[in-house]
Image (spheres, rainbow, N blue to C red):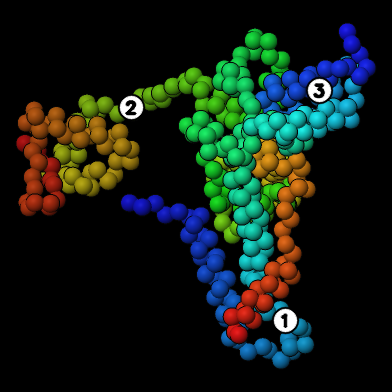
Amino acid sequence: MKELDLEVAGEFILMAATLIQIKVRMLLPKSEYEEEVEEEDPRAELVRQILEYKRFKEISESLADMEDHQRRLFTRSWFQWTKQYKKDEGISAEELLMDVTLFDLLSAFKSVLENMPKETVHHVATVGVTIEEQIDFLLNQLSEKNRINFRELMVQLKERVTIVVTFMAILELIRTHRIRVQQASAFGEIWIVKQ
Amino acid sequence: METKGRKNLKQVVEALIFASDIPITYEQIKGYIEDTTVSQIRHAVEELNLEYKQTDRAFHIFHVAGGIQMVTRESYSPWVSKLFQKRRKAKLSQAALETLSVVAFKQPVTKTEIAAVRGVNCDGVIYTLLERKLISISGRSEGPGRPLLYKTTKEFLRYFGVNDISDLPRPREIEEILKEESHLSDDAIK
């Protein structure tokens, strides 16, 4: 499934809303008392934004030309230094750190955090119920009523682990022929009865 | 050791520029040679460039990012670019160039301000530019949320081959663009 990009969707809705707002303001008659206040053309803000963008777009075109030109000029470089420099190869800390920016520091910090040995902790809780307890519980219920509705039984159990243990208790009771399970029709209610 | 007016000053300067892998400044060169002045070094560089020109060398000394560096002449790029074909970085994308234009003329500038001009989110582009060291974080704005501020770097100057940020073409004023636009539409009517 394609994921919804909220960022893009939000930008789209903002743009659509802005255009609708402009249209609405153009269509609505101006109220009389507002007429004295000189109202700016609602399109002006949009035009200003587009022109502002155009200014920088033009600059970006010049930058592209400059980049193009500059890529045809080749400077000298000390490849050995750029490939593998080590602190003990006579390079001073100053030289090593010459071009280091805050961004490098943040990236380094991030990679340190990511490469930290992970401490795996498993949280193991003791199960509050046993199969034996649930067998007793089921047999008790059955001595009170003739039959138990499987769905209703499960609904009153709150915890997932209790449900699992109870289900295992049912399986155990079936195996030892102490109870039977009945179902009148496919997908119908399941009833638990005493053997 | 020779001191004042050393005879081989031009050669020493040449050696330093030749060996440096980054633009080197006159001040730096001065620091490596005893009893010289910046103007002497400047003169030596001028003489070297003249010599290179007269002897039709394939390179010259170029002023960039506040320093000087030896570069090959443009006419030799068809061959030299083949040499570097595999290890060159990709050209900047249109989005990256636009973002750089905004940073260059509005710096220090926040992400939101850049996005406001371009009309789209710029997070990815900014990350790429930071990684390529064309912009850097210059601090935090005093505004709400204290967002990070960005500025262009020395590498930016080097990359575009200018000595100083003021050497970049300036953005036209909006009025100027408007004038041209109306002129164009007038022509269209005719």
Foreground pick, B3 / A13: B3
Task: Tell me the quadrant of the picture where the N terminus of chain B can be found.
Answer: top right
In the figure, is residue B91 to the left or right of B162?
Answer: left
Tag 3 residue:
B10
Most distant residue in the right direction: B4
Name the amino acid type tagged 1: Glu
Q: Nearer the viewer, residue A44 or B72?
A: B72
Distance, label 3 to label 2, CA atoms, is 86 Å
Q: x, y (%) of residue A154?
A: 24, 43
Give the chain letter at badge 3: B
In front here: B46 or A108?
Answer: B46
Q: What residue is disc 2 on?
A: A127
> Marks 2 and 1, how far apart in space?
72 Å
- Same-chain status of marks 3 and 1: no
- Residue assigned mark 1: A39
- CB contact under 8 Å: marks 3 and 2: no
- Other residues around mark 3 within 10 Å, as few (<14) / some (14–19) / many (≥20): some
Q: Amino acid at mark 2?
A: Val
Q: Position of residue A90 (x, y in %)?
A: 68, 10
Can residue B173 be seen by looking at this rendering? Answer: yes
For the residues labelled 3 and 1, the Cα–Cα distance comes to 69 Å
What is the crowding at mark 1: few (fewer than 14 residues within 10 Å), some, or many (at least 20)?
few
